[in-house]
């Protein structure tokens, strides 16, 4: 009986101890809740700890390690980019610097630099082709013919003259073309004779130098009155009926009075009432109506 009572006492003490422990545990948990403002779950975890907390701690540690690695990689990339930028800036040439190989403008030209050739003077010896202006063959004191230019008398001009001669005869005037085509050599002899007789200055007023004569074109005709040789190539011809008829009608047949009075400063020759030039009926009519010389009309 006494034994049973002792056993009951031991169990009672054990339960009392267990209750006290639970009470103490509960008090500690409540204190933690109060002191740290924890939830019951956090208080339990604070007293006993848990595998979840350990996992969280380990995970945080791992995250911190990863963050550190990322930061380190970022720092390395930034350093690399900065180095490349600095290198690129060093490689870019300074635009303000003068180029090394700029040629000196004061340097003398190279020896092989071509010098512009001076224009060749127009002379019968330098001319290779005759000059045409608006389809009109030109021969005057400024534009000579080549020395070897020898076309002979122009057939069209001769045909037009014959037509004009017949018209003059029908009107009661007898015409004769006493000098038409002249070669370069013939003009040379003629001009030299005039120079010998009158001097060069005076000869140049009424006779063309060789290569400069319209007679060499085959289009110049010296016309006089038949049987009145004393007036041929003479200033006296201007007063003859034939000269007056020619002055009024020659353009109808394609001829113009080539060296009219008062135009010596343009043509270079004194008035020659006997010298006519064939240029065709259409153009001859226009020049006649204009009252201009051939040089004035063509603008040469």
Image (cartoon, helix red, strand yellow):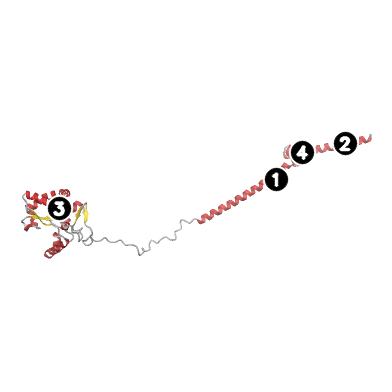
- Distance from Cα at disc 1 to Cα at disc 2: 44 Å
- Sequence order check, earlier mark of 2 and 3: 2
Quadrant of res 20: top right
Q: Residues within 10 Å of mark 1 (few under 14, many from 20)?
A: few
Closer to the camera, 96 or 92?
A: 92
According to the picture, the residue beneath numbered tag 3 turns out to be 157
Circle 1/circle 2 CB separation < 8 Å: no
Residue extending farthest top: 1
- Sequence order check, earlier mark of 1 and 2: 2
Give the foreground label among 1 and 4: 1
Circle 1/circle 4 CB separation < 8 Å: no
According to the picture, the residue beneath numbered tag 2 turns out to be 11
- Sequence order check, earlier mark of 3 and 1: 1
- Sequence order check, earlier mark of 1 and 4: 4
Circle 4/circle 2 CB separation < 8 Å: no
- Decide if residue 166 is on the left or right side of residue 31: left
- Distance from Cα at disc 2 to Cα at disc 3: 168 Å
Give the foreground label among 4 and 2: 2
Give the foreground label among 2 and 3: 3
- Distance from Cα at disc 4 to Cα at disc 2: 27 Å
């Amino acid at each position: 009986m006494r034994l049973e009572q002792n056993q009951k006492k031991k169990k009672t003490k054990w339960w009392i101890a267990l209750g006290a422990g639970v009470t103490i545990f509960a008090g500690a948990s409540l204190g933690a809740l109060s002191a740290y403002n924890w939830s019951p779950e956090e208080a339990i975890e604070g007293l006993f700890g848990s595998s979840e907390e350990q996992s969280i701690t380990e995970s945080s540690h791992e995250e911190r390690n990863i963050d550190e690695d990322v930061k380190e990689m970022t720092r390395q990339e930034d350093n690399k980019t900065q180095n490349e930028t600095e290198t690129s800036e060093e490689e870019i040439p300074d635009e303000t610097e003068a180029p090394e190989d700029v040629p000196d403008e004061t340097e003398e030209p190279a020896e092989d630099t071509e010098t512009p050739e001076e224009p060749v003077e127009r002379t019968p010896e330098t001319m290779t082709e005759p000059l045409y202006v608006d389809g009109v063959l030109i021969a005057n004191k400024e534009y000579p013919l080549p020395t070897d230019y020898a076309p002979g008398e122009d057939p069209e001009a001769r045909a037009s003259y014959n037509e004009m001669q017949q018209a003059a005869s029908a009107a009661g005037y007898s015409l004769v073309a006493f000098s038409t085509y002249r070669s370069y050599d013939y003009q040379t002899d003629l001009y030299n004779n005039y120079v010998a007789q009158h001097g060069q200055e005076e000869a140049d007023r009424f006779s063309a130098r060789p290569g400069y004569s319209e007679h060499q074109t085959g289009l110049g005709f010296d016309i006089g009155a038949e049987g009145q040789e004393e007036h041929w190539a003479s200033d006296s011809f201007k007063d003859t009926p034939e000269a007056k008829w020619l002055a009024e009608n020659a353009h109808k047949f394609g001829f113009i009075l080539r060296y009219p009075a008062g135009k010596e400063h343009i043509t270079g020759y004194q008035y020659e009432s006997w010298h006519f030039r064939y240029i065709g009926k259409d153009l001859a009519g226009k020049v006649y109506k204009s009252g201009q010389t051939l040089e004035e009309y063509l603008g040469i």
